[in-house]
Amino acid sequence: MFKNFLNRAHPLRRSLQQEPYYRFRSFAELDLAASWGLRIEANTASIDDWLRLPGISIHQARSLYQLTQSGLSFNCIEDVAAALSLPVQQISPWQSVLQFCYYDLDLRLEAIAIDANQATADELATIPAVDIFLARAMVHYRQTGPYKDLADLQKRLRLTTAVAVELLHYLRF
């Protein structure tokens, strides 16, 4: 019980809660975060996710991200090391948080990514969670100004959380 209290009060835990993309300063911090359940999925990681790892440069993070976006899959830490032209031993501490999941690229669904501030009602109605009435309301309420983000759209249209979650991957602002 006392150990759980210490873990919750740990300064690193507070930093992780306050900064979603906290950049780890050492492998010891990374190991501690891994013990709390932090994971980064190598094949879907963003540049910001990669930059959390100690010792990685922005150039390396961009390179890893671009490789996965082009369809390359990492199966193990050795693949990541090879992509970066680094010895495995140099990045092996990353293994504590990296996960390597397999994704069938033929089955992967691509989100439509419709601009909520430019699309017509008919275009918006192609989104699975949007019927023609909601689409027309979205067009109507943006006359007072463009939607800033999903939260702004949700507030203006009084959408439920469930509907907002369904729209998350289909709209851009």
Image: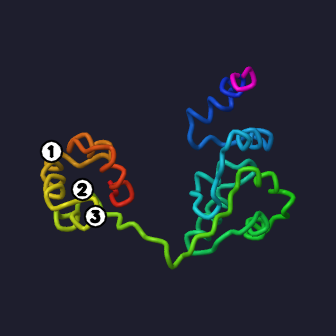
Above or below for 56 versus 16: below
**Which residue is located at x 49 percent, y 75 percent?**
107
Question: Mark 1: few, some, or many residues within 10 Å (few <14, many ≥20)?
Answer: few
Asked if the residue under mark 1 is in contact with the one under mark 3, i.e. CB atoms within 8 Å, the reply is: no
Question: Mark 2: few, some, or many residues within 10 Å (few <14, many ≥20)?
Answer: some
- Amino acid at the residue labelled 3: Ile
Q: Is residue 122 left or right of residue 62?
A: left
Report x, y in % for residue 108.
49, 72
Chain part drawn in magenta: 1-5
Per the image, the residue denoted by label 2 is: 117
- Amino acid at the residue labelled 1: Thr
| Quarter of the image that includes the N terminus | top right
Distance from Cα at disc 1 to Cα at disc 2: 11 Å
SS label for mark 1: helix
**Does the magenta portion include 3?**
yes
| Quarter of the image that includes the C terminus | bottom left
Report x, y in % for residue 170.
35, 61
Per the image, the residue denoted by label 1 is: 144
Nearest to N terminus: mark 3 or mark 2: 2
What's the mark number on residue 112? none
Of 112 and 24, nearer the camera is: 112
What secondary structure predominates along the stretch shown in magenta? Answer: helix
- Amino acid at the residue labelled 2: Asn
**Does the magenta portion include 149?**
no
SS label for mark 2: loop
Of 67 and 77, nearer the camera is: 77
Nearest to N terminus: mark 3 or mark 1: 3
SS label for mark 3: loop
What's the mark number on residue 127? 3
Distance from Cα at disc 3 to Cα at disc 2: 15 Å
Nearest to N terminus: mark 1 or mark 2: 2
Most extreme residue toward the top is: 2
